[in-house]
Amino acid sequence: MLDRYLPDEFESKWRARWQDTDLFLTQEIEGRPKFYALDFFPYPSGAGLSVGHCRNYIPTDAIARMKRMQGYNVLHPMGFDAFGLPAENEAIKRKRHPAGMIDDYAANYRRQMDLVGIGYDWSRTFKSSDPDYYRWTQWIFKLLFDRGLAERRMATVNWDPVEKTVLADEEIIGGRAERSGALVEKKEIPQWFFCITKYAQRLLDDLDTIDWPEGIKQMQRNWIGRSEGVEFSLDVVIQGEDLANPAHAVEDLRASFPDLERAQDQALESIRAAKTCLETLNATEALARCQTLLVLAASPIFEPAAFASDDLATLRTIAEGPQRRADAIEDLLEELIDEVAQFKGEAATVRAALMHLEAAGDNFDTIEDAFEDFIDATDEPDELTVRAKPMSFRAFTTRIDTIYGVTFCVLAPEHPLVKTIAKRVRPRHRAVIAQYQKQARELSETDRTAVDRPKTGAFTGAYAVNPATGKHVPLYLADYVLMNYGTGGIMAVPGHDERDFEFAHKYELPVVPVIAPAIDSIPELPYAATDGYLINSGSHTGLKVEEAKARLADWMEAEGIGVRKVNFKMRDWLISRQRYWGCPIPVVYNSEGGMELVPEDQLPVTLPDVEHYEPGDDGSSPLAGIPEFVNTTTKDGTLGQRETDTMGGFACSSWYFLRFCDPFNQDQAWDPEKVAKWMPVDCYVGGAEHAVMHLLYARFWTKVLYDAGLVPVNEPFQRLINQGQVLGRTPYRQPREGERLEVGEDGILISYDEAAKLPESDVTWKWVRMSKSKGNIVTPDEAVAEYGADALRVFELFVAPFEQNVQWSNEGMQGSVRFLSRVMKWGAELSSIYQPDWALMIDQHEATDLSRQIRRVTHQMVAKCGHDIERFAFNTYISAMMTALNKYGDLMPKDASTLTEAEQAAWSEALSAFIRVLAPAAPHTADEMWSGLGYEEFTLNESWPEAIEALAAEDEVTVAVQVNGKLRDTITLPAGLGNEELEQHALASEKVKAHLDGKTVRKVIVIPGKLVNVVAN
RNA sequence: GCCGGGGUGGCGGAAUGGUAGACGCGGCGGUCUCAAAAACCGCUGGCUCAUAAGGUCGUGCGGGUUCGAGUCCCGCCCCCGGCACCA
């Protein structure tokens, strides 16, 4: 037997044998328990694997190997996440087709995985871009659609101007695209969504049922963002008066407009002009013409030559008035026409519209006032109800208990009510509103949501009515209120909310405390805590916060003002990508714009094989430019057009773990029985960067499939473990004059060569995640070539706890080389006395002290190793073997011929067990040693040694003896002594006596087999 | 700011409330060798002490609970990761 670890001598031989005999083929033997070990679906990149990736694959392999030896049916598959932007972008850059490129990269990954001896069942492998696979991705899309969980709707999307694609919220980091780094823009297009929000509550609740890192669960909880509160209505009034009362409205108008007389004159003139127009025009015709013009004016494709000259002339009158913007006038007229038409006959509508056309030509600012006067002058009081339609908005709050402290309200600048309010308030307010809306629109999302940004806002001129107090509080616009959370409007309680407080401070709004930690105290504001009592709260004063919440909610529900509501921060999953390299969405549109799903028997909708797949500059999918793809027929045989969006990559990775259970089923996505056999995944291993997106989406799909009765589990991944990152030592230098640092960098990345040339003081070394772009990658190829595959494996397992980051050093692998060499040397020394039938012998011959000691080491090691692998503590698994080896070393005989048969058997057991326990970590070495003992079988097919507790038990124990909690002596005693005996031995210790001198023993605490603590004073 | 995870020798790290520092790296001394490497053996937390024995301090900081705290509780500090005007 080889007595040194010489990997070149045997490692590749074993890998070849494993492959040749299909060793890693999944076994499905009746009656055995199952174990599904899975690594995150990797996206193969051109950079290949680094030793960092191996830190994922090696430990999973170790546990999978142990489980197989322990008699489990083990499913340990691997495949490739092939679709997606990174692949497509790289393909474009390299001018290669992504399919071929991905094939090459995946082949390289596979080669590297094999190189380090990962025992994947390659017979089950697939890529998500295989039509055989994505056919079923489309099938699941259909399933989601049929269950009302896939929707197409207009949406403002995050647009990446560099990659020319739409991004999910999750793909934006700080306002920039995660991948390209471009500043994200807004765009409005029809998009496909999966309605994950319908599952929000279950996704949240079921986190409690799975064994995942607390951090990841918490991240998902935060992402889902559940909050409980009350949503209720607030009426909006202007000037603090109820405009439903016409008399008030007119009074108000007069009071607020001292120039009324003059305005009336102007208006009357306008009306006269309008009447003249009316007399000469057919009313219906006039209205139609107006509307046409308005629509035209708003259209970006407006083409003046296409229209009759009198239309044009009218349009010009509208659009070219002094300081007019066509869109502003259009807005106004559209509103007027809408409103008036609703309540009056056509003639009046046209009259009003024309009048305002005229008025607009004269004096835009007074147009609203002119309208008021017009209504006034027509002597038709009911027309005032048009203006006085009550306005209200809804607000969501988790702190309904603070409603008495509302001193103002805020709407998001994009809130739909703002437009209505703007029409009704006085011009100066209208101008402020318009200005503020413009400002908010122009701010990028990044700027707008920057935390340290001072609050801004604008008073609308309108007031909200607090339903609890009836008080009118000013209504503001402010961009710290977001349209896409809650209702887009809030009740502001500056006394008990930091943001509202800051805003109130800036705009000098009152701050009223309504919650106090104790009934008679006044808190320091803002006081955001929820423990306390209500003060200044009318009939609710004195209630505790929780009770007040309940009572106020009850009251609102009873009065119909509001309802209890649960709000989620999570949004639906945007799935559309306007790109080529993705799974086509199986939808066809007919000529009327209706949509239908591609029937199941016509799936897959395959991606056309084309030369050019670059996205168009307008953001349309490259598929849209391929007529052979787009043009198709609908179910009823008419011409149809295919959906040209493809699905984002997360769709493909949301069910691959199911396909692995039945990878080549041609008739269905999987056989439910097979999935029932293997699912859930027992141990799912990958990086923490997928904490939210992939893991949430996969959970969502699993739940949908569970609801559809297609999978028997509600959660896909029973146990999740995140490996730590491998960091490479990376050189940086300070920027030179004229150089600028990238955002987030505090030095300029340089190469190792450059670092070697610079003076040491100019180079800063940092530990940075290995990546090709950083130039700090160590590949498994290098590591295997220099140190050996098993050395790499052992080092990766040993170097640090599994979840912790590692600072990589090649020298560290030298340590595992040393360990493996010692193992092989020890094995070689013992091989001459190895007894294959040790198990029989060991019971037939009387044990000696030595044999008992050997067996104790063996059985302690076996127990610890199994337990440690199970709990992913691979570093202590390796160290347990090292410890055992050290102890064996101490017990090794000078002369083997003096060993008794029991001792030979004990040594044989030790060697046999050690090799098998070593196998998950160092399978090449284990197989080499195993065959050296004459065995034909691979260690993977051998059974995991059994740890016998009785043999592992110590017959002597070292007892710590303390006096007043301080260690004063250790005494070695036979195991199993009673407490009293231990106490006596402890008190008999000379050292203990010395410390007890002059003291009285008050108490003696005995921990059996461990410790005696004498308390004395 | 909020949430999560951490902070232990020169370094990576071990330690169900019970002998802190397992195991490894590095370092020091030795064996072997003409020599070096490799391998093997021994030592290796600080202070105190000529040495040993012994003593004493010691798990980010300050308190507390306990016979006994790296571990539990309270209050801080620092590092890493995530979220971030979410009503």
Image: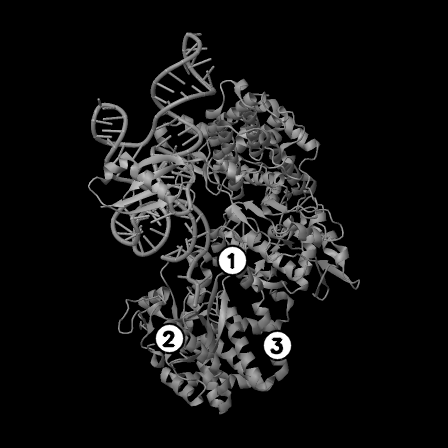
Helix, strand or loop at label 1? It is helix
Q: Mark 1 lies on which chain?
A: A
Q: In this view, does A258 lie to the left or right of A568?
A: left
How dense is the environment of label 2, judged by Cα within 10 Å: few (below 14), some, or many (20 and up)? many
Which label belongs to residue A584? none
**Disc 3 or disc 2, which is closer to the eye?**
2
Is disc 2 in contact with disc 1, using a CB cutoff of under 8 Å?
no
Q: Please tell me which residue lies in front, A407 or A894.
A: A894
Q: Which residue is drawn at 44% across and 59% down?
A: A443
Mark sitting earlier along the chain (3/2)? 3
Which percent across, then down, holds residue A631?
74, 56
Amino acid at circle 3:
Arg
Q: Looking at this rendering, what residue extends furthest in the left direction?
A: A998
Label 2, label 1: how far apart the Cα atoms are: 44 Å
Q: Looking at this rendering, what residue extends furthest in the right direction?
A: A637
Which label belongs to residue A208? 1
Which percent across, then down, holds residue A482?
46, 64
Mark sitting earlier along the chain (2/1)? 1
Q: Name the residue under label 2.
A: A474
Helix, strand or loop at label 3? It is helix
Tags 3 and 2 both on a single chain? yes
Q: Which chain carries label 2?
A: A
Tags 1 and 3 both on a single chain? yes
Is disc 1 in contact with disc 3, using a CB cutoff of under 8 Å?
no
Q: Mark 3 points at which residue?
A: A289
Quarter of image, res A938: top right
**Disc 2 or disc 1, which is closer to the eye?**
1
Amino acid at circle 2:
Pro
Amino acid at circle 1:
Asp
Label 3, label 2: how far apart the Cα atoms are: 41 Å
Quarter of the image where the N terminus of chain A is located: top right
